[in-house]
Amino acid sequence: MIKNLLFLTLLSLIIISCAPTNPSHDEHSLLIHNGSFYSPHDDLSQVEAILSKNGVITQLFTDKSWQRDTSNYHQLLDAQSNFVMPGFIESHGHFHGLGSSFQHLNFLSDTSWQQVVEKVSDKVTQTQSDNWVYGRGWHQEKWSIAPTNTIDGYPTHHTLSEISPNNPLLLVHASGHSLFANERAMKTVGINKETPDPIGGKIIRDGNGVPTGVFEENAMQVFNNAYQRHLAAQSQAVKDSIWLDAIELAQVECLRNGITSFQDAGTKNFEIAKYVSLAEDEKLDLRLWVMLRERIENLERDLSQYKVVGAGNGYFTCNAIKTELDGALGAHGAWLLEPYTDKPDFVGQNTTSIEDMTSIAKIAYDNEMQLCVHAIGDKANRETINVMETFKDSTKDLRWRIEHAQHLHPDDIQRMADLEIIASMQAIHCTSDAPFVVKRLGTQRAREGAYAWRSLLDRGAKVINGTDAPVELLNPLASFYSSVTRKHPVNQGDAFFAEQAMTREEAIRSYTLDAAYGAFEEQHKGSLEVGKYADLVILDKNLITCSDEEILDCNVVTTIVGGSVKYRMP
Ligand SMILES: [Zn+2]
């Protein structure tokens, strides 16, 4: 007993004395034992311990031989019988946006317009006159108390204009596909009754044609431009430090949630060099894989300088291009084959022309980069599939992706599988949107093609998972819960077409090995195999065997990236 205590004391000294700085890059070994190991590629029930060296898994022990000389290991980690699996890979989120959401007003958890107004009111009193107030995350369909005097389901700007006469307000919808502006902001950008709707955008107006403060899709552009000009007026040093602060906040949030790789759905060209130097300076704590989002002329001119694979020992890759064809369903922006059930004269918005999307596809093809197209409505998905089909080449493994693929015509589900187009879907969107999907699409369309994971998987298509954070909270366990129950983790309610649920195994796969496949990274990530990065997460519930309710109580105990412990539950 005393001997054991002495050993444990010595052991803890060893662990403390070897507190890693950034050991993925130096001589370093980590042995994890006493875990319930799980990997999507194989049955690991016989595995006793996993060893990694220099950030890479080097051995899976199926016997006690790892105990022979434990002084060989720099660090021993007792998983305390918890569930050990590959780290989560967020397949579609907005990394800088996630960090930035902690720097600004965040309305994601607000359940009434009144709460939004109160937050804005507080912020305005702390903000100098003329400075913009920026916030994000409100969603009119998620308010439990309906606001009064709405137009098109939205409140009007008047309350906000009263509480903020001197500060322009820009409050972006949770979907990112509409925004709220006050009178001061509208004056600043020169919007009035006479302003026509731009192509691919809509200004919500009252009965007299006067803008009510809500701007959808391309109608948001003037506000975003004005806000960007306001930001651009800051010194470069201030801008750099705000950007870096956001990245650090995003990293902390990822590690806290067990995410070891993050696929960013829209990185700007100026960010690429910044990420590369962070990766090379060993300042990234998790791995980033990003989709470049730029105007065609920038892509045509500069693409070669933005293509980066595996910088900083596998911490940063930009090898994909993002574009988008439509908006979001909540704001009637999804582009549909047939009109909306609750807006019978409207089929949604086409935000990028097919011609432009085809040009971007050609650029991606010529540069051997993945193409990732945001498509939500069945029309947007069909047009995307049509374009992708023209580039289909049996000699090339393209792995082009449709981001969201939320609503598919039944005929297109098989086409996705046949053309090997990856469905990059966010399970949590399904259950967040559930309260309005049938309203927008009607029962039949919703049943046959909305968030059709089972139909896609059964036909052989790859479905990869994520949250679209900061559109939703980043928590992969919430999205996992939605994947296997088709219920919202908080709002609950009836399951949304439960027959489309994933199995536990499929849901893990969609967040690990298949997510890695979706980025050409399955050789390095997504399973616990010798030769792969030692990117793992330890959870206090067994995601295969625990009850549905227990998923909601599951905690991330430890997050490990490159064989280095990056997060421990407090
Ligand atoms: Zn997104």
Image (spheres, rainbow, N blue to C red):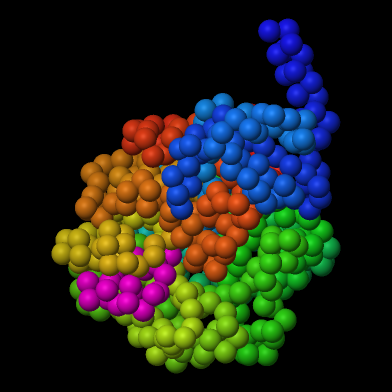
Say which of 396 and 239 sits in front.
396
Magenta-colored stretch includes residue 319: no
Instruction: In the displayed orientation, state which residue is furthest to the top.
Output: 2
Q: Position of residue 133 (x, y in %)?
A: 62, 57
Query: In the image, is 132 to the left or to the right of 19?
Result: left
Q: Residue at x 30, y 45 (%)?
A: 485
Q: Position of residue 61 (x, y in %)?
A: 58, 39
- The image quarter containing residue 321 is bottom right
Magenta-colored stretch includes residue 411: yes
Query: In the image, is 112 to the left or to the right of 475?
Result: left
Q: Position of residue 239 (x, y in %)?
A: 77, 63
Query: In the image, is 336 to the left or to the right of 34?
Result: left
- Which quadrant, please, contains the N terminus? top right
Total number of numbered discs in the rendering: 0
Q: Position of residue 223 (x, y in %)?
A: 57, 71
Q: Residue at x 16, y 64 (%)?
A: 444
Q: Residue at x 22, y 62 (%)?
A: 446
Residue 163 higher or lower than 17, as above or below: below
Whether residue 199 is visible, yes or no, is no
Give the magenta part as a residue range: 405-424
Residue 175 higher or lower than 209, as above or below: above
Q: Residue at x 73, y 30 (%)?
A: 70
Say which of 315 and 381 sits in front.
315
Residue 307 higher or lower than 175, as above or below: below
Say which of 142 and 384 sits in front.
384
- The image quarter containing residue 5 is top right
Whether residue 512 is visible, yes or no, is yes
Instruction: In the displayed orientation, state which residue is furthest to the left.
Output: 444
- Which quadrant, please, contains the C terminus? top right
Say which of 105 and 94 sits in front.
94
